[in-house]
Image (cartoon, grey):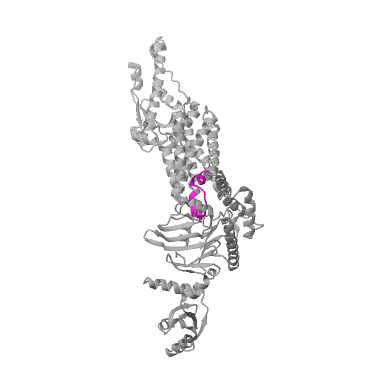
Amino acid sequence: MPGDAGAQIIVDGLVKRFGTFVAVDGVSFDVARGEIMGFLGPNGAGKSTLIRILCGLLRPSGGRALVAGIDVTKDPDAVRQRIGYMSQKFSLYNTLSVIENLRFFGGVYGVPRDKLDERIRFAVEMAGLAGRETSLVATLAGGWKQRLALGAAILHRPAILFLDEPTSGVDPGSRRRFWDLIHTLGAEGVSVLVSTHYMDEAEYCNRVALITRGRLIALGTPQELRHRSLGGELLIIEREGIADAIDLLQTAPGVKDVAVFGSALHVLVDDAATRAPALVTYLTGHGIAGATARRIDPTMEDSFVHLVGAAAAARGEPA
Amino acid sequence: MKPRRIKAIAVKESLQIVRDPRSLMIALLIPLMQMFMLGYGINLDVEHIPLCAYDRENSQQSQGLLKQFAASRYFSVRKVVHSYTEVARDIDDGTCRLAIVIPAGFSQGLNDSGTGTVQALIDGTDSNTANIAANYARAVISGFSSDLQLESAQRKGGTIQTLTPVNVQARVWFNEDLESRNYIVPGIVALVMAIVGAQLTSLTIAREWERGTMELLVSTPVKPMELMLGKLLPYFVIGMTDAAICLALAVFWFDVPFRGTLATLFFTTSLFLTVVLCIGYYISVSIRSQVGASQVSLLLTMLPTTLLSGFAFPIDQMPVIVQGITYLVSGRYYVTILKSVFLKGAGVGELALPMLCLALYAMVLVVLAARSFRKTLD
């Protein structure tokens, strides 16, 4: 199989324009065999567009994309045979039963007849749909639908899976279960590219690509992104009405960045141990008494907010 | 092309059709309704033309002539009037299409010189009916004259032969009774098939786009030709069922004589069905909304088939340019074939040319329709 030795997905300088709008702006990365790569970014960041290009559904305006060693613009059907895809919107047939949907996709993907029954049984069990094989898909709850869609996407044992926001609108328990399935597939050597706008889900990925406004602004393990990308340590400052002090803190000594988190402020500083008491004193000096400051572990969201702000500043735009 | 994938698509499409019994009912009932509506609605026979009689003489002979009109199935005497004003009013308000005015000196003239004059006033707004009415009136009057001549000849002891030197014995072939229904109904079958066929497939791709299932379908290795064949197959079965219903109605309900063979009929019907299914599919691919696709396909099949197929309006009466355009209307070939198969009992030998044209048409459309589908979301 091509690409077995190296990367299963190679993306190099990929660009996609819709008229004057640049949806994907020079994105490059690669995904290894068995790796779970997360695309993290807000809605409209270009995640879906990127995935659709890699599935051969959209033609790129520039750059190159190799999936399973095949150029997606040269032989999209060969790519399609090797990938599984779950679109953002549920796209199985609601008026067909679970088993009828699976038989359909098995047929369309050309799953060998002697293996089809076994594969379908596996998919049904994986999705936890045993006993509901003849239910119409329309009657299934969200989480089951998503798992069924995943089951349909892996019937033909693809080497690469593209999952576009597979867990959106699904309850937390089902989300957790879905990610367990993704990890099982990864362990079997399937490369998974999964997009999400849930920050916590990024933690489940081997590597995460942060995407905003069509650009890839950071790429690394969740650990790396949380710590290294911030370029400092994080303090949480709490006090009633502290959000109003955001501009004041922005100019305080040692402060690199300030962001609102709920009713508190997350403040990025060069050294947490010395700055924590200093900032409390600083606030008191400016008439805001009684604030507390303590060091916290940065979350993916901290990292994301910081990186998005930094990327915007680098381009001279508001975040 | 993999038969496996075509089968998977066909099975899926069939399940969707079966799960939507309402649309299946429509697919089977609409042709039935259209056959009845059009079969009874379109009647080019002119009968019972409403007539006003203005008898200014009121003699035995003038009444005799009016009785001839009353006896004819082409006319029905609606009113006997007594002035030209009334005649004018009745023609104006549509009470009658034709007024027969018998002048005061009618029988006098007949007796003196052997000729009489009758005035026929015809409403010319519908020129076709007016022409026919005038011809029928002439026929009634000439029938009346020959009766008179016969009578006077008998009185004078002459013979008929000297009076009618040429006697035309017209024999009409293929539609012996000159029933317009016999030649209209096979055309209606073509019209109904064109409308229903394109309607059936016009929704099939648009529905996938609207329900969001297209995105996943496009991401599979299915080929455009496989997708099309798989999708058309179940509709082909429904379409042939519709055709069987329409043709059975034509023969058993509307009593159109059927002189050809079922093999010719169903072979050509399957060609025409392929054409219209492909038209519907092409429209469905081009217009990604169900409502839009359904309307466009109705327009694109009904109008040309009604006006340019020759089903009711003879093509050789059209301007040359329009005649040229009719060659692009697939219904033209099918209507020709249907009429010939029904009324003349024509077989493959006689119909080789229109059948070839239809087959060619079907082939071109299959390729066009399949290629119109692009596997991208752009």
Q: Main secondary structure of the magenta part?
A: helix
Q: How many marks?
A: 0
Residue B365 lies in magenta, yes or no? no
Relative to B7, say whether A298 is above or below: below
Locate residue A82 relative to residue A286 in the image: left or right: right
In this view, which residue lies farthest toward the front? Answer: A5
Q: Nearer the viewer, residue A319 or B111?
A: A319
Relative to B334, say whether A116 is above or below: below
Q: Nearer the viewer, residue B366 or A200?
A: A200
- Image location (x, y in percent) of residue B263: 54, 30
Residue at 43% from the left image edge and 20% from the top image edge: B170
Residue B216 lies in magenta, yes or no? yes
Relative to A202, say whether A145 is above or below: above
Q: Which residues are magenta?
A: B205-229
- Image location (x, y in percent) of residue A260: 46, 78
Answer yes or no: is residue B78 visible.
Answer: no
For the C terminus of chain A, the quadrant is bottom left
- Image location (x, y in percent) of residue B334: 46, 34
Answer yes or no: is residue B163 visible.
Answer: yes
